[in-house]
Amino acid sequence: MPNIINVSLDTVDGQDVLKIADHGVPRYSIKQAIVWELAGKLTNGDFIDFAWNDPQPPDGIFGTPVVGGHGNSLTVTDVNNSPDSAGEWSYTISVSWNGKTITTKGVVYIDASKDPIIINK
């Protein structure tokens, strides 16, 4: 079963920003899918980029990001099966919506006002 992360549109000080409902990924013996889904007004948008921020996760934990066929989902596999795969890694995503690009870098709106992260527990 995939770990779903909803990405929606919010407005802060008159600026469109991405609101991301982050959560931790539990340890599991097999590869898991993390799926970002565009929600609300963004459902007709498209994911256009995903990048790890520094420090990047070690090789072998996460797979290559894949945008779904309709553009409104993005999937990354996660091998979180031991203490060696535990950690927190921040990322940047960009979405095309209504003729403009909205990114998490510098304008993200989350409860803690920081770059979104994946937490392998």
Image: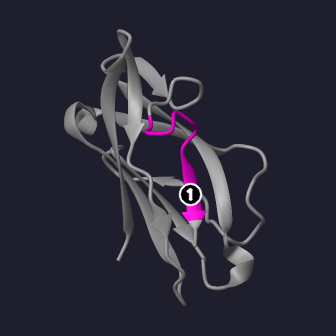
- Residue 98: x and y, percent? 30, 19
Which of these two is toward me, 71 or 35?
35
Part of the protein shown in magenta: 110-119
- Residue 118: x and y, percent? 56, 57
Kind of residue sitting beneath label 1: Ile
Q: Residue furthest front?
A: 112
Q: Image height check: is 20 above or below 107? A: below
Q: Residue furthest left?
A: 40
Q: Residue furthest top?
A: 14
Left or right, residue 59 beside residue 37:
right
- Residue 16: x and y, percent? 37, 19
Q: Main secondary structure of the magenta part?
A: loop
Colour basis: one colour
Q: Residue at x 54, y 68 (%)?
A: 77
Crowding at mark 1 (Cα within 10 Å: few <14, some 14-19, many 20+): some
The quadrant of the rendering that contains the C terminus is bottom right
Q: Residue furthest bottom?
A: 29
Which of these two is toward me, 121 or 62?
121
The quadrant of the rendering that contains the N terminus is bottom left
Q: Disc 1 marks which residue?
A: 118
Kindly indicate the quadrant of the structure image that contains residue 10.
top left
Kindly indicate the quadrant of the structure image that contains residue 85.
bottom right
Q: Is residue 120 magenta?
A: no
Q: Residue at x 77, y 67 (%)?
A: 59
Left or right, residue 51 beside residue 93:
right
Left or right, residue 31 beside residue 55:
left
Left or right, residue 87 beside residue 96:
right
- SS at mark 1 in the image: strand
